[in-house]
Amino acid sequence: MKTTLLFSLCCLPLGAEPRTSANYTLTPETNDSGGGRSTSAVYTIDTSLASAGGITSSTPALLLGKCGFAGQLYDVTGLTLGAVPTTITGGGTRQLAAYAALDDATFLALDARNVAWSVVSGPLAGIDASGLATANAVSQDTAATARGAWGGFTSTLGLTVLATTDFSTYTDWQAYYFGTGNPAGAPSADPDGDGQDNAFEFVAGLVPTDPTSRFMTSVITVPGHLTQRNIVFQIVAGRTYTVLTSSSLTSSSWRPLPGSPPTVDNGNQRTVTDTDATAARKCYRVQITKP
């Protein structure tokens, strides 16, 4: 299928004289400026009337030139789909794009509304007529595949639906993990048996159905500094963490570490250093706040 784009290009007329550069010499053996074919041992030129334009190819296939026409000619060889990025947050959307792959190794952007979109697999709720994909909520990152069809060509695009474990209300969080009317979703319940109830896991950003998803903290002496302690714990985006200290676990008086204690984040792990751990007995607690 030949298609014409309406933009102008210019090209010098093809004459019979040799064409040379530092790297090549092309010597036409015949030439027909009225429209016809010129050939040599290594190339063929098909010219339009009065050499206004032509299609040039070489043997071996090192060159394909198309110039001098009112519009560029090309063949469509396939369909390519894309998205930036190729991830969708669960419950969110992502705009998909489509491109016609051309025989000159270039791509032509298509109007997504002209593409027939469909879901092949994975947690995609659907793709509308404009190419906007909507993802379902998932508890872990999950692969998905979208399909597009246009002009007799089809193509697929791999996507990743990202886990959504942060919810604005406990009711939404409860319905996501347990549905409605399920006693396992009660705030005081501990369905995964990890010793941390649902109310705590909601605030901490944990997965209440996974016993390995639990908040852990440890206190470690800083090497070479016997009067300092590192408080180490995991962190989740969207939470605020404050290290509190007291002289007793049963104390009703817990206070934040004074000043601005040194803090280092390494991935999902945070280390807060207490630079004054000289007391004979000092206990620590991490306070988690969800906006």
Image: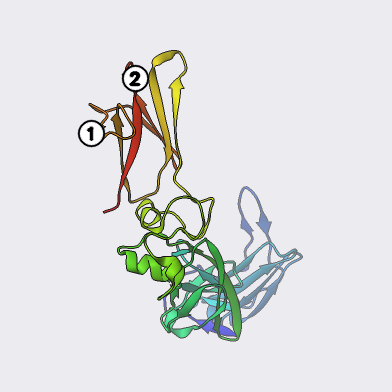
Instruction: List x then y, in percent, for residue 216.
Output: 46, 41
Residue at coordinates 53% horizontally, 56% vertically from top-left?
210
Of labels 1 and 2, earlier in sequence is: 1
Dividing the picture into quadrants, the one containing residue 112 is bottom left
Instruction: List x then y, in percent, for residue 75.
Output: 59, 78
Camera-near label (1 vs 2) is 1
Would you place residue 10 above or below residue 2 in this image? above
Residue at coordinates 41% horizontally, 81% vertically from top-left?
130
Instruction: List x then y, in percent, for residue 107.
Output: 52, 69
Distance in Å between CA atoms under marks 1 and 2 = 17 Å
Q: Which residue is mark 2?
A: 277
Q: Is residue 155 left or right of residue 126?
A: right
Q: Which residue is mark 1?
A: 253
Quadrant location of the N terminus in the rendered image? bottom right
Would you place residue 251 above or below residue 117 in this image? above
Would you place residue 73 above or below residue 234 in this image? below
Q: Is residue 9 visible?
A: no
Which numbered dot is residue 103?
none
